[in-house]
């Protein structure tokens, strides 16, 4: 795996306003990443990395401790995150992502042990994705413009959709979230 310097990173090609970052590359010497970077598979990052919004990461990316991601970061399959990772709003995670100790989601709190994230896509009137984070402070939900506790989410669903088909779908999701995190020994 080739390790690149900050200067080499700064000179990577930009296509359609997106910096093209090759896969199978060691980015551990880079501390600051511009916004709108696209990383291919099997990239490796060191501690104290900071990423701006709209970064995209391919399969099997690995991140060291103290990484911080701003809004709209997207992660492909099999991403692995080390200790003290922090994720901003609108981050999305692919299949088989795993999270290390002390990961914090949207600065709402530390994740509980085990798998701290469940997502459900294609629901509601706008086919939204619902993200459920299992935190030490309780279950935290992000869905479209909404962010808050599970109880607040249920109240918002009932207020917005009353008892229509969307409300029924969202309330089934709530049941699954509770079941999944209970199985995870987090409750």
Image (tube, rainbow, N blue to C red):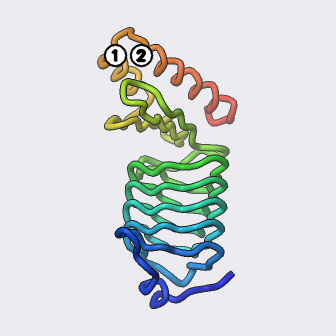
Mark 1, secondary structure of its residue: helix
Q: Quadrant of residue 124?
A: top left
Location of residue 68 with respect to 12 vertically, above or below: above
* Disc 1 crowd, CA 10 A, few/some/many (<14, 14-19, 20+): some
In the picture, measured across the screen, residue 11 lies left or right of residue 113, that is left
Q: Quadrant of residue 142?
A: top left
Location of residue 22 with respect to 148 vertically, above or below: below
In the picture, measured across the screen, residue 47 lies left or right of residue 14, that is right
* Disc 2 crowd, CA 10 A, few/some/many (<14, 14-19, 20+): many
Query: What is the C-alpha distance between the residues marked 1 and 2?
Result: 5 Å
Mark 2, secondary structure of its residue: helix
Quadrant of the snapshot with the C terminus: top right
The residue under the point 57% across, 79% down is 28
In this view, which residue lies farthest toward the front? 16
Camera-nearest residue between 99 and 110: 99
Do the residues bearing badges 1 and 2 touch, measured as CB atoms within 8 Å?
A: yes
The tag earlier along the polypeptide, 1 or 2, is: 1
Tag 1 residue: 161
Camera-nearest residue between 9 and 28: 9
Tag 2 residue: 167
């Amino acid at each position: 795996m080739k390790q690149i310097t900050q200067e080499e990173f700064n000179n990577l090609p930009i296509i359609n306003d997106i910096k093209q970052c090759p896969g199978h590359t060691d980015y551990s010497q880079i501390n600051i990443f511009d916004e709108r970077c696209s990383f291919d598979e099997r990239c490796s990052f060191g501690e104290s990395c900071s990423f701006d919004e709209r970064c995209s990461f391919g399969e099997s990316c690995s991140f060291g401790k103290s990484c911080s991601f701003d809004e709209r970061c997207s992660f492909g399959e099999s991403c692995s995150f080390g200790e003290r990772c922090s994720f901003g709003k609108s981050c999305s995670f692919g299949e088989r992502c795993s999270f290390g100790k002390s990961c914090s989601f949207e600065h709402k709190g530390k994740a509980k042990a085990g798998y701290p994230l469940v997502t459900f896509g294609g629901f509601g009137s706008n086919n939204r994705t619902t993200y459920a984070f299992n935190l030490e402070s309780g279950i935290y939900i992000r869905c479209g413009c909404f962010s808050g506790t599970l109880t607040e989410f249920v109240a918002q669903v009932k207020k917005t959709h009353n008892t229509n088909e969307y409300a029924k779908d969202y309330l089934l999701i709530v049941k699954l979230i509770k079941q999944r995190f209970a199985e995870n020994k987090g409750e």
